Image (cartoon, rainbow, N blue to C red):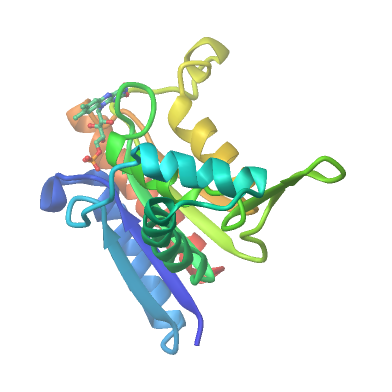
Amino acid sequence: MSKLLYIEVSPRKDRSASIEVAQSFLTTYQEGNTDSQIETLDLWDFKLPEFDSDTINAKYSVMHGEDPSPEEVAAWDVISKIANQFKDADHYLISTPMWNFSIPYKLKHYIDIISQPGLTWSFSPEEGYQGLVTGKTATLILTRGGEYTSSAELAAMDFQKTYLEMILGFIGITDVNIVLIESTLDVEAKTESIAAGKEQAISCAKNS
Ligand SMILES: Cc1cc2nc3c(=O)[nH]c(=O)nc-3n(C[C@H](O)[C@H](O)[C@H](O)COP(=O)(O)O)c2cc1C
């Protein structure tokens, strides 16, 4: 049975544009993939561990091939469980608003947890960095209050789309569909933007 992991980032729930569009994706996806399991990860209802000193030392022990201390082993176990839950999926749906030209801190925290040597990427002097989450697909539903696609100057301020594409590629996920919903702070443009986003999301779901 294949598995879709849906990562929900907006705290605005029934007022959220990104969640509304993601729901259109999920309904269509479910209809076309009745044997697929959908797991939802609401980042506002998921207690992520602090990325503290023991965890960082554990990460460096893994990277440098050193023996970790018992504290580091315990910290690494917690991280590994969350990274392995992520890796266990075949498809990903991430719906997120833009916050301060980038992603909300909850999503960055989640990425800091799952982006780990030996779990989602590897490094060797011979091969350099290699993503370990391969053969998967992802759809990103990205909302933003402004418009960042109308000029190169505005596009350069968009660290939401560029960062997510880069970090997913870094861990090996390169088959990525992007649904952009712009100008959501403009009441009239928002309605049109959400409608267009839903059509695009449905089309992505049909092809997933
Ligand atoms: C804390 C915060 C920061 C935001 N920063 C930006 C921003 O930098 N650029 C932008 O275009 N919109 C920004 N917005 C607006 C949201 O991206 C926009 O309202 C989006 O549609 C929210 O999606 P949601 O309804 O799914 O939460 C911000 C909103 C919040 C709450």
Quadrant in which residue 29 is drawn: bottom left
Whole-percent x, y for residue 113 in the image? 41, 48
Quadrant location, ligand no. 1: top left
Residue extending farthest to the right is: 126
Whole-percent x, y for residue 87 in the image? 51, 65
Which of the pair 4/52 is nearer the observer? 52
Which of the pair 206/115 is nearer the observer? 115
Residue 24 in the figure: left or right of residue 56: left
Which of the pair 65/105 is nearer the observer? 65
| Above-or-below relation of 48 to 145 | below
Residue 137 in the figure: left or right of residue 78: right
Residue placed at 39% from the left, 27% from the top? 102
Whole-percent x, y for residue 192 in the image? 30, 40
Quarter in which the C terminus is drawn:
bottom right
| Above-or-below relation of 205 to 187 | below
Quadrant in which residue 5 is drawn: bottom left
